[in-house]
Amino acid sequence: MSRYRQMQVFAAVVQAGSLAAAARQLEQSPAAVMRSIAALETRLNNKLLLRGPRGVELSPAGEQFAVSCRQILEHTAVAERSAAGVHACPAGRLTLSLPLLMDQQVLMPIALDYLTAFPEVQLVTQACEGVPKLLEENIDVALVVGHLPNSSGFAMPVGRVRPIVCGSPAYLAKWGRPQTPEDLKAHRTVLTTASGQQSEWRFHGERSTRLVKPLPVLTCTTQRAAIHAATLGLGLIRCMSYEAHHELQSGLLEPVLNDFASQALPAQLIYRDGRRAEARVRTFIDFATPRLRAHPAFLD
């Protein structure tokens, strides 16, 4: 068996988590898979897989080899697809997951330009808070805010976003501009019951983290409604910087308490299969990434 085929078998075992599952995927017998792994370990003079009652685990050497193996297989697949012209005509349904308000505030102009450039693609967007399970939920690409688990797939960083507190110019003129988190006790606030929103506002000082639980004058079921209420002067609101990007850019809202802002969170596009991904996925990643990185809603 060739070295390349041995790497393919090893990669299949790593992905499947067991010799039997890899054998079914490769349409080989478990004995043939075991012989291939044994031959690979003999050739490398190192133990790559640790066999146990629950399947197989990677040894330290196996973990390093798995990374190199995946890169080699991906580069080979890219070269073959490029030669065959697989990426020349992206088409079909592209499912994109993104946080609430990210479509309105950031993505839609980029999506329209992408569809103009690739008219054979049908783009479907869906809202999701947190990190979706791409394979289980049949999602091609997800724009995610926050730190990623190791199992989330391939990631393309696009920038950072930050929790902010802001209010309308009319509100700040009437009620004043808070200088410290403790000043919020004398202010009106607008809250939301939307998923992922916390009733306590967290601020970072020089030595400690401060928690403030504001008393709301209005509680909305969506962040969109709460931001709109804040632009009308009803009170201060805490949101992610991208969620009120247009309102901040147009002057409808102004940020306050910048010296106590929480730590910025990374934003990234995640997807499966790397360079082996379908043409519509690869072209969207290549098209959207530089445009998102240049978007003023994301910090450098």
Image (cartoon, rainbow, N blue to C red):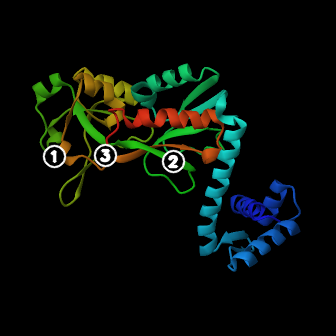
Q: Of residues 160 and 215, which is closer to you in this image?
A: 160
Sequence order check, earlier mark of 3 and 2 = 2
In the picture, residue 281 is in which quadrant?
top right
Residue 155, disc:
2
What secondary structure is marked by label 2? strand
Side (left or right) of 27 relative to 135 = right
Side (left or right) of 201 relative to 139 = left
Side (left or right) of 91 relative to 184 = right
Residue 221 visible: no
Q: Of residues 162 and 186, which is closer to you in this image?
A: 162
At which x and y percent is residue 95? 60, 32
Residue 182, disc:
1
The image shows residue 219, relative to residue 157, as above or below, that is above
Q: CA distance from mark 3 to mark 1?
A: 13 Å
Q: Where is the C terminus found, in terms of image quarters?
A: top left
- Residue in the image at 61% along x and 56% along y: 71
Query: Which amino acid, by three-letter code, is at mark 3?
Result: Glu
Q: Which residue is mark 3?
A: 200
Q: Of residues 89 and 232, which is closer to you in this image?
A: 89
Mark 1 crowdedness (10 Å alpha carbons): few <14, some 14-19, many ≥20: few
At which x and y percent is residue 145? 43, 43
Query: Which amino acid, by three-letter code, is at mark 2?
Result: Ala
- Residue in the image at 39% along x and 40% along y: 197
The image shows residue 38, relative to residue 88, as above or below, that is below
At which x and y percent is residue 222? 41, 29
Query: Which amino acid, by three-letter code, is at mark 1?
Result: Glu
Side (left or right) of 29 relative to 69 = right
Q: Where is the N terminus found, in terms of image quarters?
A: bottom right
In the picture, residue 217 is in which quadrant?
top left
Q: CA distance from mark 2 to mark 1?
A: 39 Å
Residue 204 visible: yes
